[in-house]
Amino acid sequence: MVVRPSLFDIIKDALALFGVRGMTVEQVHRVGDNTGHVQIYRGQRFTMTAQPYVKIDLLVPEPELSDLTRVIDKILSSHGSDGAMWTSRVDLVVRVRTSEHGLDAL
Amino acid sequence: MGGEEIHETMIPYPNWLNAGDTAWQLAAATLVGLMSLPGIAVLYGGIVQKKWIVNTILMAFTGFSLVLLVWVLWGFNMGFGNPLHLGPGILGNFVGVPHTLLGDGTQAQANIPLLNGGMPDFHFSQSTLAYFQFVFAAITPLLFLGSVIGRINFKVWLIFVPLWSTLAYSVNAFLLWGGGWWAQAPRGALDYSGGYVIHLAAGTTGFVAAAVIGPRLARDRARAVPNNLPMAAVGAGILWLGWNGFNGGDPYFAGADAATAVLNTNLATATALLTWLLMDMFLSPQRKPTFLGSVNGMISGLVAITPAAGFVNGLGALLIGAIASALVWLSWNKLARTRLFTRVDDTLGVVHTHGVAGLAGGLLVGLFADPHIVEYLNKDGSTGFSATGLLYGNPMQLAVQAGAALTVIVWDALITYLILKFLSLFMKLRMSDDELEIGDVATHDEEAYPDESLVHAVAGAPSPAIASTPTQGADRVGLVSDAEPGAG
């Protein structure tokens, strides 16, 4: 999912209640359909065409998927956020340290 | 000690030397030097695009170095030495005879030949005067550097600065400070610390140079956001407090007028900063207070009080700060939108913050100079030298101020144009477009914030850290070959 940076902690804490602990986060920029924010340096106006967002990758077992997406969607909509969320199927997960595969690796 | 009488056989300095005046002059000079390095270097380094930080800072450091050599080898005496007789009238009092400062005369009492009798005798040595005046000569090219950032060929900078310092700065200094034509009676043009000699000169030169060299890349102009506002804050703060030496040093004596100049400088500056801030908050399209706007206001105040610092009273200083800041704000936000100013790409707007502000201050001292603010006393304590502006009954002063301004504008514009046109005969004034696209890395093989995770030292490079790598490798190879027979 891609969400505003301010929502990261809220999502992380909410997912922790459902037992989700590990996730991968990266700082990204999102070019949205809304016009960019204006910054002014020395009287010159600059429009910022891309906004800072965070992208969160989450690996979850399929049975929990609908519950978790519902939770995340609730958080995003209750904060009026314009973030986005999507799911995709993962063929293979390996936990390198323990060589565990599949669901055991999550 | 024990009450024993001490018979001194040596003395530290001759009796014309005063330790207090000497100490203040050297301290003031150092403060002014700090305004260049690191002041201007980090202020400009912080407000240029990230890709030009190294280029900007290196131009500042090289400009400072170049001017010192020029100054010691011939420049100082062109600004403050004996007049070179080029012809009648202004031509006979236009510039000094070039002469080095390398001899033993630098420990003698300081002396500006044309000012003898017109001011108290100096209480410090010639090298004190020369170094103090050097830091002013040095900061001037660093100021107009702001106009040409982002395209000037670095080699052109290295040649332009010494030529300009020789042909333009020394003339400005001689005309107004070295006892030259504009300083002489009956004119008596006022420039306390360089509103004209330095700031109007820098604004004019920067603007003309920007026009001759041509604009930055259109892509750069569209995305020229500053890279580091805290670094700009460091530079701006050093400028403000450094200005205590800039204006406080110019009476040449650690006396009451030095203190007047320091207090006036700070008063005008604070007023100007707040004036710009309020105009941003209530008159700008965005109605927001901005930090870099307030820095522009601060600089406008510092520059405008410079020609007036020890000639006006506190109310005069306050008014100069407010008026100059408002004028420069209008120049920055309105005049800059006119055809002439949009055609010339003055990168950091030096023509406004130094040119317009210096001109405003130079004219305003013609209004506000208060005859009761005394620079030098007579021996009986009466007023020896003070200045009188229009508001105190001397309308001529304003006309003289305008004439001196015109001379500086015309001469510096002409010299700048001629030097650059001359250099363009055998070198390119601009970097190539390819170089401009890349910036610092293309020009200097350096960048301001290299990312260590993406680099690796090239083997064989002459660096101790790198040289150790092959040695360690050789040791390990040696160990393996020793071990093999034993294992077999």
Image: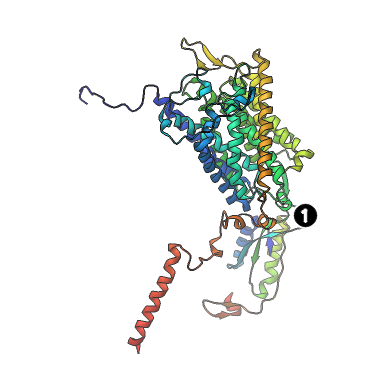
Expressed as whole percent of the image width and height from the top left, the position of residue B286 reads 74, 40
Q: Considering depth in this image, is B343 or B267 the residue closer to the camera?
A: B343
Q: Considering depth in this image, is A64 or B104 the residue closer to the camera?
A: B104
The residue at 68%/65% (across/down) is A1
Expressed as whole percent of the image width and height from the top left, the position of residue B155 reads 60, 50
Chain identity of mark 1: A
Q: Considering depth in this image, is B134 or B289 the residue closer to the camera?
A: B134
The residue at 72%/53% (across/down) is B219
Amino acid type, mark 1? Asn
Quadrant of the rendering where the C terminus of chain B is positioned: bottom left
Quadrant of the rendering where the N terminus of chain B is positioned: top left
- Badge 1 is on which residue? A34
| Quarter of the image where one finds residue A72 | bottom right
Residue B44 in the figure: left or right of residue B380: right
SS for dot 1: loop
Whether B457 is drawn above or below B278: the answer is below
Expressed as whole percent of the image width and height from the top left, the position of residue A22 reads 58, 68
The residue carrying pointer 1 sits among few (fewer than 14), some (14 to 19) or many (20 or more) residues within 10 Å by Cα, namely few
Whether B60 is drawn above or below B374: the answer is below
